[in-house]
Amino acid sequence: MSTHGDRHGGDPYRPFRPRAARWVSTVVAVVFAVVIIGLSFVVPSYATVTVAWLDRLGFALVAAGGALLLLRHAAVRADPSPEGLRVRNLTSTRTVTWAEIVSVRFGHGHPWVQLDLADGETLAVMGIQRADGARAVAEAKRLATLVARHSETSRDD
């Protein structure tokens, strides 16, 4: 049976990374920084030279902050290993063992995969995003397969 994973070396533990979000976020971060910094030199300053440089510094800080946020979005991922899954989302990173994952959901209307955990919590996996279309569906299936593989027991329960 040929699966999406077979075309990429068959390594089920390769990282889950969004394609569209990574490219869009990176391009927008660069454009945002260039535009904001450019504006800092175009917007007329009616103040003293010292205040003008402080204004430019403020523009640069806004550009850097916005670009860093966008680049963090470009860096979301999930790294599977034989022990579990390390999920790096926009604001946090969390590692869960395979035994903690009860189910993998990627229902219609969800922008990314959701993991139902044994403690009742839900963990978003932004590394698999609906914007990637059929590729995202295949990656969600690969994740569900990993969960099922690591949930098997010697008993049939």
Image (tube, grey):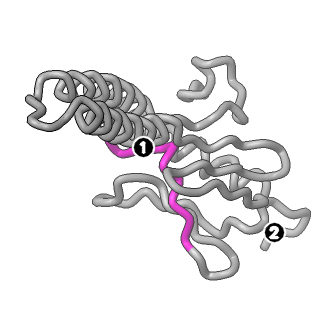
Q: State which tag comes first along the sequence, 2 or 1.
A: 1
Q: In this rendering, would 101 be left or right of 99? A: left
Question: Quick check: is 111 in the magenta stretch?
Answer: no
Q: Residue furthest front?
A: 48
* 46 relative to 26 in the view: left or right: left
Q: Amino acid at mark 2?
A: Asp
Instruction: State the predominant SS element of the stretch in magenta.
Output: strand
Q: Of the numbered discs in the image, which one, if any, rests on residue 84?
A: none
- Cα distance between the residues tagged 2 and 1: 46 Å
Give SS at disc 2.
loop
Please state the horizontal and vertical placement of residue 96, each as a whole percent of the image: 73, 60
Query: The C terminus appears in which quarter of the rendering?
Result: bottom right
Mark 1 lies on residue: 69
Region in magenta: 122-132
Q: Where in the figure is residue 98, as x and y percent of width and height?
A: 76, 59
Residue 133 makes an appearance in the image? no
Name the residue at 60% across, 48% down.
88
Residue drawn where x is 51% and y is 43% of the image: 127
Where is residue 4 shown, x and y percent of the image? 53, 27
Point 79% across, 42% down: residue: 81
Q: Is residue 95 left or right of residue 54?
A: right
Quarter assignment of residue 73: top left
Name the mark nearer the viewer: 2 or 1: 1
- The crowding category of the residue bearing disc 2, from other C-alpha atoms within 10 Å (few below 14, some 14 to 19, many at least 20), is few
The reply, left or right, for residue 108 in relation to residue 44 is right
Circle number at residue 156? 2
| Near-viewer residue (53 or 140) | 53
Q: Residue at x 68, y 80 (%)?
A: 119
